[in-house]
Image (cartoon, grey):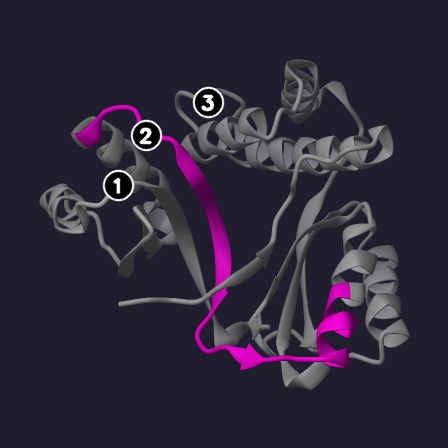
Amino acid sequence: MGRAYQNRKLSIAKTSDQKARVYSKYGREIYVVAKAGGADPSSNLALRGLIDRAKKDQVPSHVIEKALQKSQGAGGEDYSPAMYEGFGPGGCAVMVACLTDNPNRTFGDVRQCFTKTKCKMGTPGTVSHMFDHLGVLSFSRNDEEAVLEALLEADVDVTDIETEDGRITLFVPHTEHYNAKQNLLEAFGELDFQVDEIQYLGQTAVQLSGEDVDTLNRLCDMLDDLDDVQNIYHNAQF
């Protein structure tokens, strides 16, 4: 088995401005998930997993609490998800996940990033069929068969599993993400998840080199700088 994937994820930033953007991105996502499924993490499993990831990325508690309060009517924001698709350099596929309170503004900002890097935006569905929507869990262990057996006994659907350098990476349908994590913790005790998130993963990879790599990095950097952009997915390999 094996699945190569690339994902521009939120990372711990070094400057106060960068940290503020990271906190804002998490705050928006927590707000939307809590508004949709309730602000109680014990009953909203998606929210519980999101808060766990936010804490792991050192998002302050007051940022999390403020987002939860706003989701219950304490603020005026009204964010909704938006996904934009297009083609990057070398014909690679790019998906841009956003949370926005002004879709026209966000569309214009994202389109400008594609235009400035001589890339091409597409219509909904242009490249999304090239990706699988999966939960990804990665942790340090070597017993792939035992992990797979524990999940199958718990009736968790496993899409793929791989072991490399003493680390297991597990791929499950996005709807099974939290269920898979909980069953792993019950079967093996405390685990340190290096990756614990839901991603769009390319079904096939497009190899890039030279200037195409620089162009894709520039496109991702420009998109990352937009407040409305939450995540960027592509199927390029370098």
Sequence-first disc among 1 and 3 = 3
Q: The disc labelled 3 sits on which kind of residue?
A: Pro
Q: Give how far apart the Cα atoms at labels 1 and 3 are.
A: 28 Å
Residue bearing the label numbered 3: 41
> Badge 3, how many Cα within 10 Å: few under 14, some, many 20+?
some
Q: Earlier in the sequence, mark 3 or mark 2?
A: 3
Rendering coords of residue 67 (x, y %): 68, 24
Q: Which residues are magenta?
A: 188-217
Secondary structure, mark 1, is loop
Residue 198 inside the magenta-drawn segment: yes
On the rendered structure, is 167 left or right of 152? right
On the picture, is 29 further left or further right than 167? right
Residue at image position (69%, 14%) is: 62
Which of pointers 2 and 1 lies earlier in the amino acid sequence?
1
Image coordinates for residue 186, horizontal then vertical, percent:
20, 27
Q: Quadrant of the N terminus?
A: bottom left
Q: Amino acid at mark 1?
A: Arg
Please tell me which residue is depicted at 85% across the width and 74% down the height of the picture.
117
